[in-house]
Image (cartoon, grey):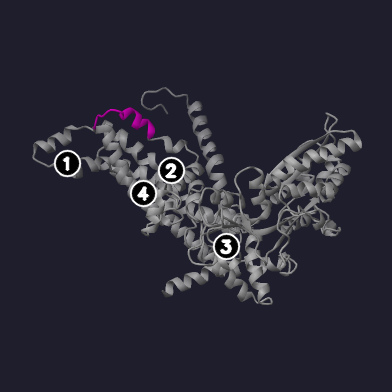
Amino acid sequence: MSRHGIPHNSWTSLSIRTGSLLYLAVMVILPLVALGVQAAEPGPWAFWNEFTNPFAWHALKLTFTTALAMVAINAITGTATAWVLVRYDFPGKGFMNALIDLPFAVPTVVTGIMLVALYGPTSTLGAIMGQSGFAVIYQVPGIILALLFVTYPFVIRSVQPVLYEMDRAEEEAAATLGADDWTIFWRVTLPTLWPAIVTGSALSFSRALGEFGSVVMVAGNRPLATKTGPMYIFGEIESGNRHGAMVVSVVLLTCSLGILIVLNRLQRRGDESHGR
Amino acid sequence: MTQVLLSGCGSSGPTPSGADTLTIGAYSVVREALHDGILPAFRAQWKARTGREVRFEESYNASGAQARAIRSGFDADIAILSLEGDMTLLVKQGLVKESWDKGPNRGMVTRSLVVIGVRDGNPKAIVDWSDLAREGVAVLYPDPKSSGGARWNINAIYGSGLLAAQGDRAAGLAQLASVQKNVVNMDASGRQSMATFDRGTGDAVVTYENELLLQRKLGRGAAPYVVPNSTLLIESPAALVEASIERHRNRQLAEAFLEFLTSNEGQEVLVKYGFRPLDPSIDNPARPPLPTGLFTMKDLGGWPKIKKDVYDAGGIWDSLFIGSQVTNRGK
């Protein structure tokens, strides 16, 4: 029972394990099971009907595509930001580092209002963009923008510690052997960072699937155009179609869970191949 | 079942302080009129009549959410809701008497009109629903899926098209579709829609007259609006929640309050907050008279029919978008 030389009372160990499993069950598993049961109750045919309803289908598709677009951008910009914070020294670095987490502290509705004020049709920038056919607010790009803001810290915060701890001897060895900067990054640095980038991306993706407060302010919420899954769920609950809302929730959650499991596997494989 | 739930929470009987307590569950739009106007006025009247103090417990929420809260055990003595259908929900649960709508006002306590809020000076020269369909006019109204109260707005646009064509649903649909194509943003509630308009988005907002007049009263600008000649009279109900009254033993107080709401004194307070009175003769003479083409939900066949025709799955509301998707594909 005692691992790593830490003495364990087997009774304490058992109760801690039972306790944390129970806590997980009560906090996460129980509500999810209740949701699943209620969604499944009217039968597979009813479930299928709600799932293939064009409004539900479009909302789900929009939620996934915008979340994927956000992840693609975040994976690159987040890694670059972490890189800058770890590898460079410049005045105000500490302040910049502190700013990174701020998007978590801003109420999402405020995020939405702020984005509308900045890029909305009444702002100078938004008016210019609108006239040139690149309207952001009340269009799909606005949704991606809101998601980028609310998930901003995830990739940075998972890549940053890995970069800090990274042994630079490998990079130096590659440089000595004549590799250029780009090759070093691509062949030496990135493979080490990869699992961290995947973790950060997975977290931001899951977070994005359920995002409501900011998206509802910027999306425009037009059915079959800019209405996302969470807004669809809210509308169906308010108009008395609880089952339709639950079906869409279950689909969102299942996909989210599936992606987390797959990424978890990928990450573990990455860890193993790097001897971690 | 509900009875068991209800008896399981909260205390019963008069409060120990000796004051009479009345719990009100209302829809959000009446908040200011109730909290700042009706409640103080009724408190004074009750004090003069009985010598006793009234303590109010107030809850404001979207009409549907409020009805669901009361159904699940929120012990409001009085339910003031936006939609008749939300009251029907409480009747079905046995919380409100089936005869709630049999009185002289059919259970209705607040009235308003569906109007079009415009920008200062009405730069887009909007006077009627057809102007909302013009190219380059950006329109706002809330999503009728997430906001029950938004259905008043949709019904007004749909209904004016419907009635102009002697009840031809296709004409109603066409009118609604022509406006919907100019809608830039659909907020989750009427208040949010108003806020979006205030922040500068859109040329026109379809909303209730009292919401715009409240903006003026609160000093948030001139809030200019136009009353389309053919528009819908909004009539919202209030009723006693029998189960709560039995438990709180405050029937006399609750009945007096409901009576006050429909009395001229109560209605005059509501007029100050922008509502139209039940009795047109006490209306504020300074504001636009009721339009000649005013219609009611009864003229449209009643709420159950409209719910089925317009809002149920596969109804007119859904077909607006399925239709537009088909044309988009064809392009």
Q: Quadrant of the C terminus of chain B?
A: bottom left
- Residue A238: x percent and y percent? 62, 55
**What residue does disc 1 label?**
A184
Q: Are marks 3 and 1 in contact (CB under 8 Å)?
A: no
Which amino acid lies under the numbered mark 2 shown in the image of this protein? Val
Q: Earlier in the sequence, mark 4 or mark 1?
A: 4
- Residue B180: x percent and y percent? 54, 65
Q: Earlier in the sequence, mark 4 or mark 2?
A: 4
Residue range of the region highlighted in magenta in the rendering: A88-99
Q: Secondary structure at mark 2?
A: helix
- Residue A129 sits inside the magenta stretch: no
Q: Are marks 2 and 1 in contact (CB under 8 Å)?
A: no
Marks 2 & 1 on one chain:
yes
- Image check: B22 left or right of A2? right
Q: Secondary structure at mark 1?
A: helix
- Residue B73: x percent and y percent? 73, 45
Rendered position, A5 above or below A24: above
Disc on res. A71: 4
Rendered position, B231 above or below A79: below
Which amino acid lies under the numbered mark 4 shown in the image of this protein? Val
Distance, label 3 to label 1, CA atoms, is: 64 Å
Answer whether residue A271 is visible to the viewer in this image: no
- Image check: B9 left or right of A62? right
Which amino acid lies under the numbered mark 1 shown in the image of this protein? Ile
Distance, label 2 to label 1, CA atoms, is: 32 Å
Pick the residue in front: A58 or B189: B189
